[in-house]
Amino acid sequence: MKAFIVSLAVASASVLALEDLTAAASVRCTTTKDCPTVACHKLMTCTSGRCEYIQVPAETLCPGQGCSNGGGCDDDANDYCDVKGKCNDTFKTSACTCKIGTGCYDDAKCDGKTGKCPANAPSPTTKVCTGKSNGGPCDAPTDNCDGKGNCKDNYLPSTKVCKAGGPCTDDAKCDGKTGKCPANAPSPTTKVCTGKSNNGECDGPDHCDGAGNCKDVFLGPTVLCGKGATLCDASSFCDGSSSTCPVVPNALIYLDEAKVSLTTYLSDTVTQCSAKAVSVGSGRLTAMYSTAANNVALAVAAIASVAVLASIFFAKKAERDSIEDGYAWLADDIN
């Protein structure tokens, strides 16, 4: 072993490194209390004003006497002396966590080479975290770190229905950008719905109005809703504004559904219509017209039918084909 005798003139003890021994050679001591502690050396005595040391064996622990002490990764308790009498630092291994990570940062771990604890590294994108948007109908079940130390909110895709639609509103779907569910949009006018008026003779298939409401649709005037009971009864057509079948005055329709005016009708079918009127009662025909002029025309037609009726009684009904078709059929009704 090497022995070092150093003269020190210090009032209190301190730890000196091996290289300080030579510099301290001129310092004088009066007792061992004046001699500082020297790493990896044992103080023997103060002789002739000088401190006498002896080097300790290699691998002897020198806790906290190395160059790096007190750091997050310093293993000060296990510092050790080498064969040259120097105290070597010992550091914690990579299995040691020196700083707990939070949020989207991982735990910081020692590297076994330094006493300084490294900064917490950002967590990978596979790490689950809790973002700022939570509990909304379009929030995804879990959020993930972005790889930069931040928690990224995840949202449900745009295919996800978050609120069912109504008769004239579409399903609301997530947009993949927010946790909120958007409002239900009005359905297009091509969407079929069920309005307030239904099952009437003139009710048509209802559809949405493009503003979220169901619009009642009624059949137009080309749709026959009530056929006349006889040749002299007018058929009824829808009017496009109501579900009920209206009774249309001042109009007559033949059996072939050709629409004609009163004048034409009386001119073409005076024999048939007048004969029928006598059978069923002229009031039934008269009720079909609202104006006095039309009533007068009907009355004239009814009177004119008397002469026609006289000829009917003297004809053979089965052979009667010289008059318009339907005559004999109508004449049957008055016998």
Image (spheres, rainbow, N blue to C red):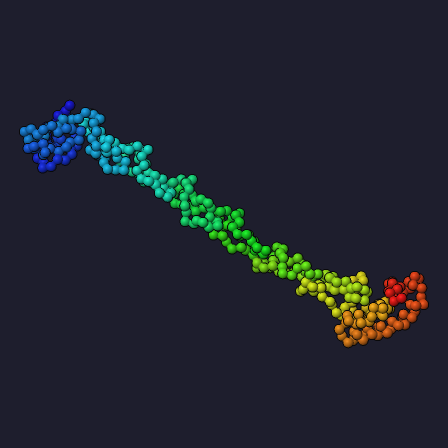
Instruction: Name the quadrant of the N terminus.
Output: top left
- The reply to whether residue 20 is visible in this rendering is no
Q: Is residue 142 left or right of residue 273?
A: left
Q: Position of residue 313 (x, y in %)?
A: 92, 68
Q: Position of residue 42 (x, y in %)?
A: 14, 28
- The reply to whether residue 292 is visible in this rendering is yes
Residue positioned 57% across, 59% down in the render: 211
**Considering only vertical position in the picture, is 10 above or below 249?**
above
Task: Return the residue found at the far top.
Answer: 1
Q: Is residue 243 left or right of residue 227?
A: left
Residue positioned 91% across, 68% down in the render: 312
**Considering only vertical position in the picture, is 84 above or below 228?**
above
**Quarter occupied by residue 204:** bottom right
Residue positioned 57% across, 55% down in the render: 166
**Considering only vertical position in the picture, is 12 above or below 243?**
above
**Quarter occupied by residue 332:** bottom right
Q: Position of residue 15 (x, y in %)?
A: 16, 34
